[in-house]
């Protein structure tokens, strides 16, 4: 039996990196296309200051305007208690994404918290989310190195993964926020974090790549045991708050690569058949 690889479509990460704000009506139409095609996991927005990220100001409005099939997960990012309160007050969003950073400097710059403060927040937020029947997804940014001048240590990453798991988070992702990883670094990191861990608990990958790098880096992650990826149709986006960030992994090219390598992709056939059309739709929003 083919090994299953899951995908989360990160529309949020695609849109927040654009030079213009995508109108709400166009977001809704695009997201509904994805839902109708059978995408099971969509990262649709963030509950953050609209002054800082104006592209996400309409996040609360989106779920109510979507026809979401049963079993589909909508995710939104939260970076503080105010954001979590807003998410919990929004029906239809079943998962919060919290941005934790292995780089102390970036954690403070991105969320105005130390790593210790952020870890305590993750624990408290996870408990509140579980009480409300919702899930917590934590991405560890700068997980393959950083350009902030902070030291990088794989053992430290392993320790933080264990600590965040102990806080009860439902899933973890490792983010190459500023595109520091090559194939060797990906293998090194995943070998360390997967040791002694069941396959279903190996963190996913949120990679920022160039078109030329994507195939080799995805192959390296797969070879090292990664079976979950964040991706974006059109290969759009990246972190606008990090210096040197590249774009997201292209959902269309990732799915094609997985099929060619003999993996099963956690998308229905109608979604796989529609990837060209959906890729064009994503690029139209960026245009």
Image: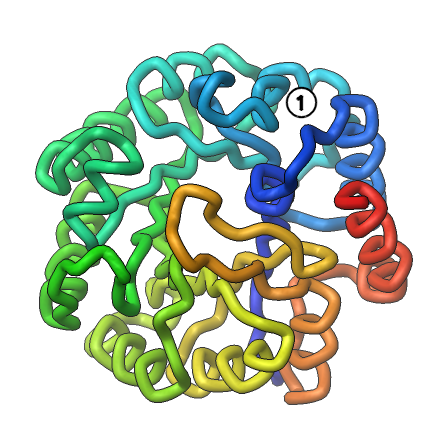
Quarter of the image where the C terminus is located = top right
User: For residue 119, which quarter of the picture?
Assistant: top left
Q: Is residue 34 above or below residue 227?
A: above
Residue 204 in view, yes or no = yes
Q: In this view, does 62 lie above or below 242?
A: above
* 155 on left or right of 10: left
Scheme of image coloration? rainbow
Asked whether 258 or 146 is in front, the reply is 146
Residue 42 in view, yes or no = no
x and y percentages locating residue 14 in the rendered image? 62, 46
Residue in view at x 22 percent, y 29 percent: 112
Asked whether 253 or 255 is in front, the reply is 253
Asked whether 223 or 112 is in front, the reply is 112
Secondary structure under badge 1? helix
User: For residue 162, which quarter of the picture?
Assistant: bottom left
Residue in view at x 42 percent, y 63 percent: 204
In this figure, which residue is indicated by the disc labeled 1?
A: 63
* 97 on left or right of 111: right
Label 1 Cα neighbours within 10 Å, binned few <14 / some 14-19 / many ≥20? some
Residue in view at x 58 percent, y 39 percent: 12
Q: In this view, does 239 lie above or below 84?
A: below
* 32 on left or right of 114: right
Quarter of the image where the N terminus is located = bottom right
Residue in view at x 24 percent, y 71 percent: 193
Tally of numbered tags? 1
x and y percentages locating residue 220 in the rendered image? 45, 85
* 146 on left or right of 76: left
x and y percentages locating residue 4 in the rendered image? 58, 72
x and y percentages locating residue 235 in the rendered image? 67, 60
């Amino acid at each position: 039996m083919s090994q299953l690889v899951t995908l989360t479509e990160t529309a949020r990460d695609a849109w927040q990196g654009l030079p213009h704000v995508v109108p709400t009506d166009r977001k809704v139409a695009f997201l509904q296309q994805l839902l109708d095609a059978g995408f099971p996991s969509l990262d649709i927005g963030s509950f953050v200051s609209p002054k800082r990220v104006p592209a996400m100001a309409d996040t609360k409005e989106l779920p109510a305007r979507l026809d979401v099939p049963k079993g589909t997960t909508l995710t939104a990012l939260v970076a503080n208690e105010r954001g979590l309160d807003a998410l919990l007050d929004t029906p239809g969003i079943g998962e919060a994404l919290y941005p934790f950073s292995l780089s102390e400097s970036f954690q403070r710059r991105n969320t105005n918290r130390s790593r210790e403060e952020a870890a305590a927040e993750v624990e408290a937020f996870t408990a509140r989310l579980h009480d409300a029947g919702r899930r917590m997804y934590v991405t560890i940014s700068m997980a393959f190195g950083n350009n902030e001048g902070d030291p990088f240590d794989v053992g430290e990453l392993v320790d933080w993964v264990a600590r965040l798991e102990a806080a009860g988070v439902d899933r973890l992702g490792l983010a190459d926020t500023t595109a520091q990883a090559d194939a060797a670094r990906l293998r090194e990191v995943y070998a360390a974090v997967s040791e002694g861990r069941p396959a279903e608990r190996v963190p996913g990958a949120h990679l920022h790549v160039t078109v030329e790098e994507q195939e080799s880096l995805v192959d390296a992650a797969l070879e090292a045991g990664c079976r979950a990826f964040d991706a974006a149709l059109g290969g759009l986006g990246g972190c606008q708050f990090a210096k040197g960030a590249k774009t997201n992994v292209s959902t269309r090219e990732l799915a094609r690569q997985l099929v060619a390598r003999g993996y099963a992709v956690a998308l229905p056939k109608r979604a796989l058949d529609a990837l060209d059309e959906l890729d064009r739709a994503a690029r139209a929003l960026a245009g």
